[in-house]
Image: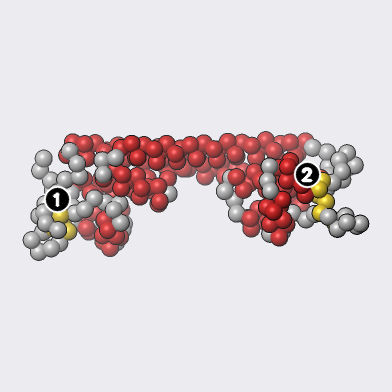
Amino acid sequence: MARRSLRPTDLAREHGLSTQAVRNYEDDGILPPAGRSDAGYRQYSEVHAQALRAFLALRRGFGHGTAAAVMRAAHRGDEESVFRLIDRAHADLLRERDTLDEVATALDALAAAPAAGDGRRGPLTIGALAHQVGMHPASLRKWEKAGILRPQRDGATGYRLYPPDAVRDAQMARHLRRGGYLLPQIRVFIEQLHAAGGTADLREMLHAWRARLRHRSRAMLAAGRHLDAYLDLVARAGSPPPEPGGGG
C-alpha cells in the first residue's frame, strides 16, 4: 500500500514531544527502523506514527519498561511475547488489587480489635512475630532500624519483645510493603497512626491507592486500542516494512 512519508517533527508534534525524543525512541527499538531519504533524513510512515501512539498509551498504564518491551516484541512479529508481557502486567495489577483488599480487611479488623495494652495478649518474641507475619527476623530488625517498629526489651535477657501495638504495626507494614510502599512512607504512616490514635490516615492512603489502581486499569484498557491498531497495521503490511527512501 502507498505510504505517506512523515518527518520526525510530524510524529513529535502530535504528542508535544521533541524531535530528539522521537529519534531516541527509534534508536531504543521502541519504534521500528526508519528509512532514509537520498539526503540521509529519516522518513517515517503511518506505521511509525501508530507505533508511537501505542507506546505512549502503553507507558501510561504499564510503565516505560513493559511498554518498550511490548513494542520491541511487536516489531519482531512476536505476538506470543507481546501477550505474555501484557498478561503478566494484568496479573500483577490483580495481585496488587488483592493486596489492597487485604489491607482494607486488616484495617477493619484493627478498628474492631481491643485497644492495645488491655491485657488480653502478651508481647511476642521476634521469632514469634516473624512467624505470625510470614517474614524473616532480619526483616523485622530492618524495619526497626527504619523506625517502623519499636519493640520493648526484656529487662533480664535484653531480647526484643513486641507488644500488641507493635504487632499491629508489623501486620500493617507487611500489607503496605506488598502494595509497593517504601519503608520511609510506611514509617510516616505508622507515626501518623500513633499520633492520631486511629485509622483515618490509613483510610485516606487506601483511597488514594485504589484511585491509582483505577487510573492504571483505565490506562491499560485505553492502550489496548492503540496496540491493536498497530498490530493490525503490521499484519496487513506483512512485517514492519522498509520505509520510503530505503537505505541504511
Front residue of 169 and 124: 124
**Neighbourhood count class around disc 2 (C-alpha, 10 Å): few under 14, some 14–19, many 20 upward:** some
Residue 202 in view of the camera: no
Quadrant in which the C terminus is drawn: bottom left
Q: Position of residue 82 (x, y in %)?
A: 34, 40
Quadrant in which the N terminus is drawn: top left
Q: Position of residue 240 (x, y in %)?
A: 20, 45
Q: Secondary structure at mark 1?
A: loop
Q: How many labels were placed on the picture? A: 2
- Farthest residue toward the left? 38
Residue 114 in view of the camera: yes
Q: Is residue 83 left or right of residue 126?
A: left
Q: Secondary structure at mark 2?
A: helix
The reply to whether the C-beta atoms of the residues labelled 2 and 1 are less than 8 Å apart is no
For the point 36% across and 36% down, the residue is 83
Q: Is residue 141 left or right of residue 209?
A: right
Front residue of 11 and 1: 1
For the point 51% across and 36% down, the residue is 94
Q: Which mark is residue 128?
A: 2
Q: Which residue is mark 1?
A: 243
Q: Amino acid at mark 2?
A: Ala
